Image: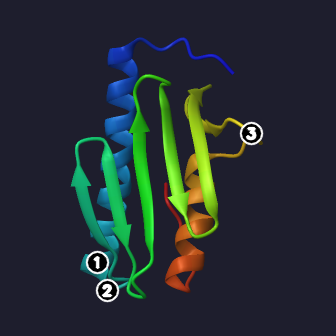
Amino acid sequence: MTSSLSDAQYRQLAADTLASVESTIDAWLEAGVVDIDTHRTGGLLELTFPNGSKVILNTQPPLQELWLAARGGGFHYRHADGRWVDTRDGSDFFDRLAEQASAQAGMALTFN
């Protein structure tokens, strides 16, 4: 899977994706759904769940990838056809994030 993005396009898409995840989690916190702590340093977003487990989202500019690390494994995504797609099985980033976050939070969570 090759990317046709410029470096600037990649950086913007990756930043928008991390901001979207943060926004969703902030909304859950305000609504009392779940208390997931977020900590962002540049292109790295760390999600800490109430049980102390973590999900790490990390940009990989040289590869133009977005990486997701969770208890359930490590996953690499490239942007294609308007979404982040797993480089191994073609699954959607937000679907996998929801699956991993739900498992670690002990409740169903959905990201848009």
Q: Is residue 9 left or right of residue 90?
A: left
Total numbered badges shown on the rendered structure: 3
Label 3's element?
Answer: loop
Q: Camera-side residue: 33 or 44? A: 44
Residue 77 can be seen, yes or no = yes
Instruction: Give the amino acid at mark 2.
Output: Gly
Q: Nearer the viewer, mark 3 or mark 2?
A: 3
Find out whether the residues at labels 2 and 1 contact each other: C-beta distance under 8 Å: yes
Q: Nearer the viewer, mark 3 or mark 1?
A: 3
Query: For residue 88, which numbered disc appears in the image?
Result: 3
Image spot of residue 44 (x, y percent): 32, 48
Instruction: Tell me which numbered mark, 3 or 1, is placed earlier along the sequence.
Output: 1
The quarter of the rendered structure image containing the N terminus is top right
Residue ID at (64%, 37%): 85
| Colour theme | rainbow
Query: For residue 29, which numbered disc appears in the image?
Result: 1
Query: For residue 67, which numbered disc appears in the image?
Result: none
Label 2's element?
Answer: loop
